């Protein structure tokens, strides 16, 4: 019941009691009077009835003022203190009560109890942390291991909801999206935005069938095309419930989810296609040439007495066809050189790491000093590191044994699609014949023999070996050509340190959650996925042309805010900003130039919010802006909505302010980045997470219960 309504009931009850007492007193006196006295009393009272009524009203006003004062000085402080105590017990345990005023002594006593509670709580929490340390260590170890895997890994439950994914998968899905909608990845999102549901269902059926066959490996492999035209090879492995033996009977294993290991094979497929085209063009194009040559040769063999002129003409045909065949072979070699190279698995690695490994190998195995002369620190190469290191060590060893070279230096610089890997030394030069012999001999280094030759190592990399002499500098070098790889996207150490020790894109607890197939209204708040968002606008009146200039949003999954899965986008409003609004949101006109318009941003934001409950502070304001764009963009936000302003009024009806800053202060939430869309969204999300247990204390557990409670508050009447 609202605070004002309760106060009104108290005042009305006091006035009624006053009127009842006056009426009872008057009735008692009236019955005690004789009939003549009653008539005389009425004669005296009749001309003074207005004064009597006025006195009664004034008495009621005095009573009302007294009750209001008593309520304000004794009841309201107690109620506010009760709310403060609940905050102290739950959402903000660091909070303490004021020790001034009429309830100061009570506040001191409560603070003392809170201090004692905190001592006990810290002791209990320390014991709990100690007990959970080993479990958390195992979780974090597994999370870190998955995070560093070079292969994309995604784990889903049977409903297709993503439970875990590693950094490689995040980068790969980002590349698959290529700026378009359709390849979002995140905890709680559906894998069916990437793969067809029937494809996954068929793979699961295959796994179930193989599980029933003893000794059969329960995995399924398939290749599919994404909505952006990329080819993915996927291997699916089941996540099984604990398989154990109960006595001598094995408990039947059940599939609770699946692991997808993904590889983008688009480039491999294109290479294979080019190879097939090359082979087809070579065979089909050469068929007629070979037929002409065969016919000319058979004619020459059949007619040995052929006239010289005619014989020369047939020989000319053979020569022309042979030249044409040679030209086609040369053209094929140049156009399809990459496709015709020997297939060998090459690994991408940082050039600096390759050089460091070569230095260690040469210094340890050959006993030669090494130095770095010039290496591009940002260069990535694609190499068979084992055979390439063998080759470099082999060359250094031959230089040491045959020419007494005591020191070699390294250079590694890019040159187009290939990189120049130079092994440099001062002093003796090597003859061309010696270089050719070294290139063809099997490699040996430090007693370790290799069946490979240096030429075969070059063939694996699609390169070759050059020998150069710098006469002016009195030095020479071997140059090996190795392919350049695209640089790997790395995550800054500062980004990895944010938040807890467990990466944000893991949540093992999600294995315990059901899918989102149930009706959202009946689902508990702790089981829902939320998108907490905020907007910055040119003004406060969307009906008068004000526009959105920034979206900021963050997701909450399984009771955790995933700051890594955030949305932050400026929007070109196609209108000038008012000077008075710029100091509030800090966005200038220049920052909006070149940004996408609302027609582009709104569909992307809608997809980011897909299958979630929207949360905002003063949500009516933000939703009104979205509704105003429904007709022009065709995007309709029909998501369930929760408003932290209204929920604050539900939780703390006796507090004077429900602004975001006041709520954050009450709940012990630090405010960072206020009046930026993403900053406000993060603060709102942290406030909302603190509110969920407070709502549960009031018996509000489900989405429907929270919405109904919010609708009953005074602030729910505000319209935009």
Image (tube, rainbow, N blue to C red):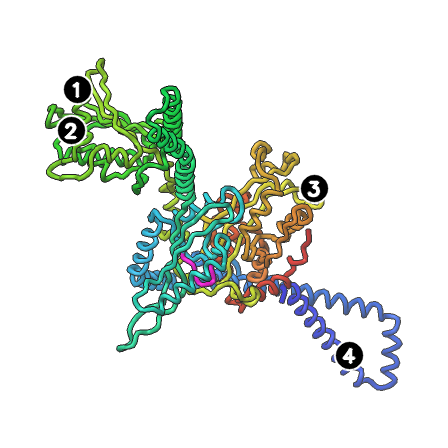
Q: Residues within 10 Å of mark 1 (few under 14, many from 20)?
A: some
The residues tagged by marks 3 and 2 sit, at their Cα atoms, a distance apart of 73 Å
Image quadrant assignment for residue 274: top left
Q: Report helix, strand or loop for mark 4.
A: helix
Res 655 label: none
Res 545 label: 3
Q: Is residue 349 visible?
A: no
Q: Report helix, strand or loop for mark 3.
A: loop
Q: Is residue 355 visible?
A: yes
Q: Are marks 1 and 2 in contact (CB under 8 Å)?
A: no
Q: Report helix, strand or loop for mark 1.
A: loop
Relative to 597, does residue 500 appear above or below in the rendering?
Answer: below
Q: Nearer the viewer, mark 4 or mark 1?
A: 1
Dot 3 or dot 1, earlier in sequence: 1
Q: Residues within 10 Å of mark 4 (few under 14, many from 20)?
A: few
The residues tagged by marks 3 and 1 sit, at their Cα atoms, a distance apart of 79 Å
Q: Are marks 3 and 4 in contact (CB under 8 Å)?
A: no
Relative to 475, does residue 353 appear above or below in the rendering?
Answer: below
Q: Residue at x 50, y 56 (%)?
A: 196
Q: Report helix, strand or loop for mark 2.
A: strand
**Residue tagged 1:** 429
The residues tagged by marks 3 and 4 sit, at their Cα atoms, a distance apart of 66 Å
Res 369 label: 2
Q: Nearer the viewer, mark 3 or mark 4?
A: 3
**Residue tagged 4:** 26
Magenta stretch: give its range. Answer: 155-160
Q: Are marks 3 and 1 in contact (CB under 8 Å)?
A: no
Relative to 691, does residue 280 appear above or below in the rendering?
Answer: above
């Amino acid at each position: 019941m609202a605070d004002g309504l309760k106060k009104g009931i108290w005042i009305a009850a006091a006035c009624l009691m006053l009127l009842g007492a006056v009426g009872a007193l008057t009735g008692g006196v009236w019955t005690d009077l004789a009939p003549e006295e009653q008539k005389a009393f009425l004669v005296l009272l009749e001309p003074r009835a207005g004064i009597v009524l006025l006195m009664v009203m004034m008495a009621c006003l005095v009573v009302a003022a007294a009750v209001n004062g008593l309520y304000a000085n004794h009841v309201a402080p107690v109620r506010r203190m009760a709310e403060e105590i609940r905050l102290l017990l739950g959402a903000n345990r660091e909070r303490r009560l004021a020790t001034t005023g009429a309830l100061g002594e009570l506040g001191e006593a409560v603070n003392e109890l809170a201090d004692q509670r905190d001592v006990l709580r810290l002791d209990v929490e320390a014991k709990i942390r100690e007990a959970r340390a080993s479990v958390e260590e195992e979780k974090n170890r597994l999370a870190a291991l998955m995070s560093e895997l070079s292969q994309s890994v995604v784990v889903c439950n049977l409903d297709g909801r993503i439970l875990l994914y590693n950094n490689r998968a995040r980068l790969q899905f980002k590349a698959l999206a290529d700026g378009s909608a359709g390849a979002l990845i995140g905890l709680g999102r559906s894998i069916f935005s990437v793969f067809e549901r029937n494809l996954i269902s068929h793979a699961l059926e295959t796994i179930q069938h193989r599980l029933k066959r003893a000794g059969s490996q329960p995995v399924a492999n398939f290749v599919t095309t994404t909505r952006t035209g990329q080819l993915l090879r996927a291997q699916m492995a089941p996540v099984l419930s604990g398989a154990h033996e109960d006595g001598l009977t094995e408990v039947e294993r059940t599939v609770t989810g699946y692991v997808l290991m993904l590889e983008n094979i688009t480039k491999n497929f294109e290479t294979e296609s080019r190879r097939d085209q090359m082979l087809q063009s070579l065979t089909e194009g050469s068929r007629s040439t070979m037929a002409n040559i065969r016919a000319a040769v058979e004619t020459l063999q059949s007619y040995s007495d052929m006239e010289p002129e005619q014989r020369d003409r047939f020989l000319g045909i053979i020569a022309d066809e042979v030249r044409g065949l040679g030209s086609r072979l040369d053209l094929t070699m140049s156009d399809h050189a990459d496709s015709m190279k020997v297939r060998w698995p090459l690994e991408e690695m940082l050039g600096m790491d390759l050089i460091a490994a070569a230095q260690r190998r040469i210094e340890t195995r050959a006993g030669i000093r090494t130095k770095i002369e010039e290496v591009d620190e940002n260069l990535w190469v694609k190499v068979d590191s084992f055979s390439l290191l063998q080759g470099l060590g082999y060359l250094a060893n031959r230089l040491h044994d045959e020419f007494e070279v005591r020191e070699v230096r390294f250079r590694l610089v890019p040159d187009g699609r290939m990189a120049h890997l130079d092994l440099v030394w001062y002093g003796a030069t090597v003859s061309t014949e010696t270089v050719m012999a070294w290139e063809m001999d099997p490699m040996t280094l430090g007693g370790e023999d290799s069946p490979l030759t240096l030429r075969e190592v070059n063939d694996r990399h699609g390169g070759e070996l050059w020998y150069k002499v710098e006469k002016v500098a009195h030095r020479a070098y071997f140059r090996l050509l190795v392919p350049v790889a695209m640089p790997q996207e790395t995550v800054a150490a500062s980004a990895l340190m944010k938040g807890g020790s467990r990466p944000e894109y893991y949540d093992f607890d999600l294995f315990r959650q059901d899918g989102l197939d149930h009706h959202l209204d009946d689902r508990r708040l702790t089981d829902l996925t939320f998108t907490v968002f905020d907007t910055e606008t040119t003004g406060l009146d969307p009906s008068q042309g004000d526009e959105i200039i920034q979206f900021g949003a963050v997701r909450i999954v399984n009771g955790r805010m995933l700051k890594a899965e955030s949305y932050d986008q400026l929007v070109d409003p196609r209108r000038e900003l008012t000077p008075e609004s710029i100091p509030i949101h800090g966005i200038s006109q220049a920052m909006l130039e070149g940004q996408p318009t609302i027609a582009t941003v709104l569909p992307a934001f809608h997809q980011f919010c897909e299958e979630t409950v929207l949360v905002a502070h003063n949500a009516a304001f933000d939703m009104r802006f979205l509704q105003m764009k429904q007709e022009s963009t065709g995007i309709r936000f029909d998501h369930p909505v929760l408003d932290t302003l209204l929920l604050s009024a539900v939780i703390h009806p006796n507090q004077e302010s429900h602004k975001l800053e006041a709520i954050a202060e009450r709940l012990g939430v630090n405010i960072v980045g206020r009046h930026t869309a993403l900053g406000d969204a993060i603060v709102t999300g942290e406030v909302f997470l603190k509110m969920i247990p407070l709502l549960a204390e009031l018996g509000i557990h489900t989405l429907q219960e929270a919405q109904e409670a919010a609708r009953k508050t005074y602030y729910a009447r505000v319209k935009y």
